[in-house]
Amino acid sequence: MIEIKDVTKNFGDFAALKGVSLEIPDGSLTALLGPSGSGKSTLLRVIAGLEQPDSGVVCISGDDVSALPPQQRGIGFVFQHYAAFKHMSVRDNVAFGLSIRKRPKDEIRSRVDELLRVVGLDGYAERLPSQLSGGQRQRMALARALAVEPSVLLLDEPFGALDAKVRAELRTWLRRLHDEVHVTTVLVTHDQEEAMDIADRVAVLDHGTIQQVGAPRELYDEPATPFVMSFLGPVTTVGGIMVRPHDVSIAAEPGDRALEAQVVRVVHLGFEVRVELELALGEQVSVQLTRGEAEQLELHDGDIVYVSASSSFQAPPPASRPEPAAPLPQGQQG
Amino acid sequence: MLSRWGLRGAVLVYLGALLLVPTGLVFYRTFEHGLGAFWDSVTTPAAQHAFQLTLELAAIAVPLNTIFGIAMALALVRGRWRGKALVEAIIDLPFAVSPVIIGLSLLLVFGREGWIHLPFQVMFALPGMALATIFVSLPFVVREVVPVLREVGDEQEQAAATLGATGWQTFRRITLPSLRWGVAYGVVLSVARAIGEFGAVSVVSGHIAGKTDTLTLLVQERFENFDVRGAYAASALLAAIALATLFTMTLTRRRTA
């Protein structure tokens, strides 16, 4: 388990972390999710010891490692731009940590062969990193980090430099690898889809504070703050209340608490239909319907309809959002 | 098409007139009267001594400047300290200041009426000439290594740290190998500069024939004594050393690239 207690970090005038506390359970795959400048990478580097916090404590497996350099923390770190040792073969890259630990040559060789098989790079051992594709380089970096059997694996935007197709493949692959290896993993990403897809727990960060921690589903269905809600998926507002576009219902007749609206545009996106509406006060609403629902309603531009939020987020709208959002205590989620 | 050839032609004529023809002429004049005359001229005791002294000075200055250069480049690129900009400017001083001034300033500091007196002879002897050579060839390694260090970045070093490598292990196994071409190029330039240095060494050497003459000083001395052919021979030897250094560099680079 990784415990982070009240960690703050400033870079000059910029407060990257403002008293962050977080617990990462053993064997989990946790994503640190947030926009750029939210402090997620800084938090990961603080866990690794690559960055010294101004105050606060980091514990790994119950030991306070705050004063330890990265070398002694038992971690594996994977960088966005691979940080491949360019002058070394793939084999020597993966073997680096083991040769630093002065393991016997036979043991290193067999361990490296095994790892290269795990990451699907057998047959590439004698190549140089420059002869590999981006995805292959990142798998090599992962094998290199896993070689020293770290108690914690830290990944800093590991797929950020790859194109969309490779990114999706590697994501699935990493998830499967984690299910096999079970090493406690923390992954930094700004891509909410990636976090929801790969992680079993997600911590959302904004402006150096943790907004919410929970399972991807919890965050999506019960966001604690407007920020979490809007960061995890599309939102629209109906009568000043934030809702997901698929949680707005449209009726042809006036109903209880329904608001009158005019259809501005109907966009057909295959199975899904997006309807853009305007309320009486000029408020724009975007609604997501299935094709069946849309066909039943027979919507046309200029029609007058009645909209209501079928389930909604009960928090102040973004305009009057309290600043800054307080970090939630551990365990109190949603 | 025409303008491209015109441009190429202009560049080649410029190079030819200013570089190739004069250098070629030195070699031509040297071997005009056969190899024997050349051999006699470069094997006189004075010439042998000058040759040896030149290599000694390079052998002292280049390793020192290489070690200093790598350390300084690391401090400039990786370090965060006050006065960095000033130090960076000072390092370029030997580029900006005429070697004669460097020689004179060394004389002012270590000379008979200078500020610093050491128990052994500095001026008009090997130590003073070594100082002058170190001074003029100081910036090359720093200047070649700094951009490479910037380009390589520190992520590989951080990765090595997370894999358990100590600072020294990281330096030896990661940083130094990734700098090797910058260092090699800096060394070649330093060697060329150290061997070819004239002004500063001239001031501090005192021109004691057979004792403090380097190859460049020998060229001047022979020229002034109307031994033109001797001067050409010594020049050819100097040029040959410089060319050999450059070729070694190009060859090793091609093989590893």
Image: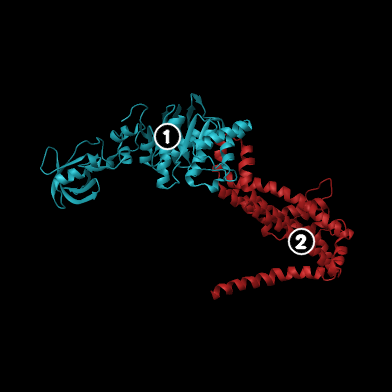
Chain colours: A cyan, B red
Q: Residue at the spot x=19%, y=42% of the render?
A: A239
| Amino acid type of the residue that numbered disc 1 sits on in the rendered structure | Arg
Front residue of this view, candidates B48 and B177: B177
How far is mark 1 from mark 2, CA to CA? 63 Å
Q: Chain of mark 1?
A: A
Q: Estimate how packed mark 1 is, as few (under 14), some (14 to 19) or many (20 or more) residues with alpha carbons within 10 Å.
A: few
Foreground residue, A258 or B107?
Answer: A258
Mark number displayed over residue B142:
none
Whole-percent x, y for residue A137 in the image: 51, 43
The answer to whether one can see residue A9 in this image is: no
The residue to which callout 1 is attached is: A176
The residue labelled by disc 2 is B240
Question: What's the residue type where badge 2 is placed?
Answer: Ala
Q: Position of residue B5 (x, y in %)?
A: 58, 73
Residue lying at the far top of the rendered structure: A62
- Farthest front residue in view: A123
- Judged by depth in the image, the label closer to the viewer, 1 or 2, is 1
List x then y, in percent, for residue A192: 36, 40
Q: Chain of mark 2?
A: B
